[in-house]
Image (cartoon, rainbow, N blue to C red):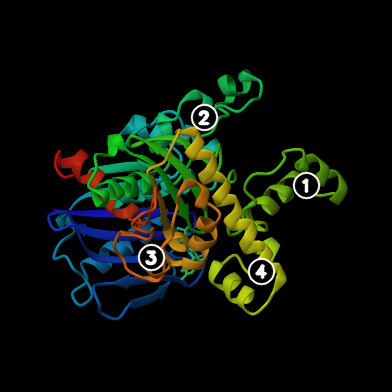
Amino acid sequence: MNVLVINAGSSSLKYQLYNMVTEEVLSKGRVERIGMDSSILTHEVDEKPEVREVSEILDHTTAIRKVLDMLTHREFGVLRNIKEIRAVGHRVVHGGESFSESVLVDKDVKLEIRQLFDLAPLHNPAHMMGIMAVETNLPDVPQVVVFDTAFHQTMPKNSYLYAIPTVLYRKHKIRRYGFHGTSCDYVSKRAAEFLGRPIKELNLIVCHIGNGASCTAVLGGKSFDTSMGMTPLEGLMMGTRSGDLDPAIVPYTLNKEELTLNEVNSMLNKHSGLLAVSGISSDMREVVQAMKEGNEQAKLAFEMYAYRIRKYIGAYAAAMNGVDAVIFTAGVGENSDVLRQAVCEGLTFFGIGLDHERNAVRSGEPRRISTDDSKVEVLVVPTNEELLIARDTYRLVLGEGK
Ligand code: ADP
């Protein structure tokens, strides 16, 4: 029983093929530059060298066909026949208020996702292209959609409403939705397993720190509050996003700099955050390197970034009236020991003790980085959104699995 997991972007598409009996990744890869000349398909199987094919791939339907050709390729493939793919699971960024869990795709689900285009104009249309492309290539294969927002639908009203006229919520659904939900769900369950405690008894704070970054308060296994809002711009400082700011800055900047609204939007999403403050890069590795070489702006960017995370941890510990474990995950959270140290150093009043040796260890497994006598556990738990998508797909299609 194999499940293909797809993450479709506007000009790219990532895939992973899972054997759901063993939960092993049989193959993974990506198609880049869809709709441009010289599109690139990169395909990986086990430890074998990557296969790279450059061709013209004008749309997502062709991209999926090329992926299926590669998966059944005599030399590079892992399947004898595409019929061995029993189901396809898609990552979908925005499920609005319509979806609080993963669902099988049908006519109504597709219609609903289309109605959410306004809330995620860069993402949902691309996901829909992925769904339609699979439908064209594999018309008899069931598809499942897994939403980044679904996990956060348990947030109480006082967490998700903005203090603006309620008519805006009623008419336009302006509220906080939160993102990285699939990751938070996966990581909190893994953390509970690791701690050997029922998730229902735990107050967790998940710090998903990648290019995009968010903190989530997970109370008894359910999202209670999260730092991203109606869009992924709110909350922590990120690679290129500003995170929280005074909304009055928008009209003020429009006026002073004679920028258009689109330009200000683009500035806040693509030209702010670590990139803007460091003046070097949106990549934490490069910022840390420059900081070590004595670059003052890089140091400031790093400190601001860590400080915001610390503030959110403090806020969520208060929101839940206590915290059992703080969890770091995603690209920066899993890999940057200096960032984890900078965040935790200011939290000693909580009773957080960081064990520097444990913090320096690299491993792909969940691990404890706090000291044995720390009152709050600090864990690093590698995320795996694709596996959770594959599991949900398997469960919904065959009624089996975790
Ligand atoms: P995305 O939000 O795109 O899914 P990821 O979770 O893959 O992002 O994180 C990507 C980011 O992780 C990179 O931009 C880089 O800044 C950061 N990163 C990866 N490895 C390291 C490392 N060793 N030290 C610090 N940061 C790292």
Amino acid at circle 4: Ala
Secondary structure category for the residue under label 4: helix
Q: Secondary structure at mark 3?
A: strand
- The three-letter code of the residue at mark 3 reads Arg
- Residue situated in front as seen by the camera: 14 or 110: 14
Mark 2–mark 3 distance (CA, rounded to whole Å): 37 Å
Disc 4 target residue: 298
The label on residue 260 is 1
- Residue 286 locus on image (x, y percent): 58, 73
Residue 34 showing in the rendered view: no
Q: Is residue 85 above or below residue 286?
A: above
For the C terminus, the quadrant is top left
* Marks 4 and 2 close (CB-CB < 8 Å): no
Front residue of 144 and 206: 206
Helix, strand or loop at label 1? It is: loop
Q: Tell me the SS state at disc 2.
A: helix
232 vs 328, left or right, is right
| Mark 4–mark 2 distance (CA, rounded to whole Å) | 33 Å
Residue 159's tag is 2
Characterize the local packing of mark 4: few (<14), some (14-19) or many (20 or more) Cα atoms within 10 angstroms.
many
* Amino acid type, residue under disc 2 in the picture: Ser
> Who is closer to the viewer here, 187 or 138?
187
Between marks 1 and 3, how big is the CA–CA gap? 35 Å
Circle 3 crowding by C-alpha within 10 Å: few under 14, some 14–19, many from 20: many
